[in-house]
Image (tube, helix red, strand yellow):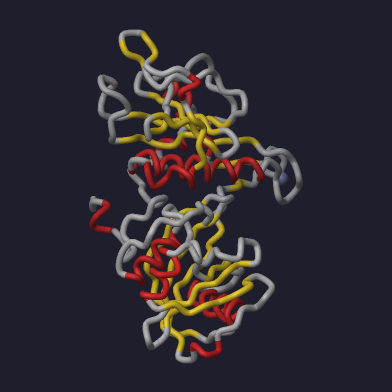
Amino acid sequence: MRTPEEILPVLGRLPLARAEVDRGCEARAREGWLEQVWARDEARVLWVSGGRAPVLGGQLVLTRPEGELPDGAVYLGRSTADVAPGTGPRAELILLVSEDHPPLRAGEAGGQPVAEPEDIAWVGLREVAAALTDRDAGVFAEAVAIANWHAVHTHCPQCGTPTDITQSGWVRVCPRDQSQHFPRTDPAIIVTVTDHQDRVLLGNNVAWGPRMYSTLAGFVEPGESLEAAVVREVHEESNLRIHSPVYLGSQPWPFPQSLMLGYTAVTDHPEDAAADREEVAHVRWFTREELAQAVGEGEITLPGSASISRALIEHWFGGALPEPRTLQN
Ligand SMILES: [Zn+2]
């Protein structure tokens, strides 16, 4: 099996693309798997509520299972990282989504809790991802994505009957027509457009403040290739005709259920750039010096460090830019 370093995309290890946990796709499909795991000493529970998870000291707070296995639990996988000193090198991770979680303790030392519930902060993935370990960032992204799917796929899309959750939370089955429904992911392309002077085009979306600039992006439509989506979206938003789209990397963006696929592409006619005024209010070409100056002086802000947009811009730039003043995507 190859190490993560051997399968890194051009963009490197993106903050939400760190898959340290073995999801156990075969094991979780077995009847009764979750109940078995729930009873194990190495089982740990990640509670997620409203897209937020408990964090203490830069780590997710994982708790021991207590009582009966609750409805709606999802198996997240087996970690190869330590959970806490003295608890063994591997942990079975279970996700629970609930507004009604019990008081959480970060850990136990000699039977005494080492952190009180009020010390634990409930934090969103975007805010904390870049600071988390590989295991915590990956499992948080997985947890939010599957929780978001369950939240809006409660009924059979064919007949409207409420569906039953099976296979440790990874499949929903209609009791009326037995149709199976699997978690969905929406592919979206995101792209740095450059010209023959090696400038980059960034856009200001109408939904953002006037100073926020990012790469162009959009959802892949049914029956469309990724490359065709890059060509179409860039033209729709900026009026530019591009060629030579090159794939650079991807990461999940579960807000609520996207997979961002990063590209770079070239235009021969940068002078044609014009915002569509519907989705994008302004587009602007930057040299490296112009972008560094605009960011450094606070004239514009860029996407946060958890985003693939940030990684794409810094890949073009050739290194880190000053930290943005906002954490928008
Ligand atoms: Zn049905």
Query: Where's residue 287, x and y in %?
Result: 39, 78
Query: Where's residue 60, x and y in %?
Result: 41, 32
Residue in view at x 55 percent, y 89 percent: 272
Q: Relative to the observer, which residue lies in front, 281 or 76? A: 281
- Asked which quadrant contains residue 320, the reply is bottom left
Q: Quadrant of ligand 1?
A: top right
Query: Where's residue 309, x and y in %?
Result: 45, 63
Residue in view at x 53 percent, y 54 percent: 328
* Residue lying farthest to the right in this orientation: 160
Q: Does residue 39 sit above or below 124 in this rendering?
A: above
Count every numbered label the image shows and give the total.
Answer: 0
Residue in view at x 65 percent, y 66 percent: 206
* Residue lying farthest to the front in this orientation: 297
Residue in view at x 46 percent, y 86 percent: 267
Asked if residue 239 lies left or right of residue 105, the reply is: right
Asked if residue 64 lies left or right of residue 188, the reply is: left
Q: Does residue 85 sit above or below 59 in this rendering?
A: above
Q: Relative to the observer, which residue lies in front, 142 or 1? A: 142
Q: Does residue 171 sit above or below 199 in this rendering?
A: above
Asked if residue 182 lies left or right of residue 4, the reply is: right
Q: Relative to the observer, which residue lies in front, 243 or 55? A: 55
Query: Where's residue 253, x and y in %?
Result: 50, 53
- Asked which quadrant contains residue 14, the reply is bottom left
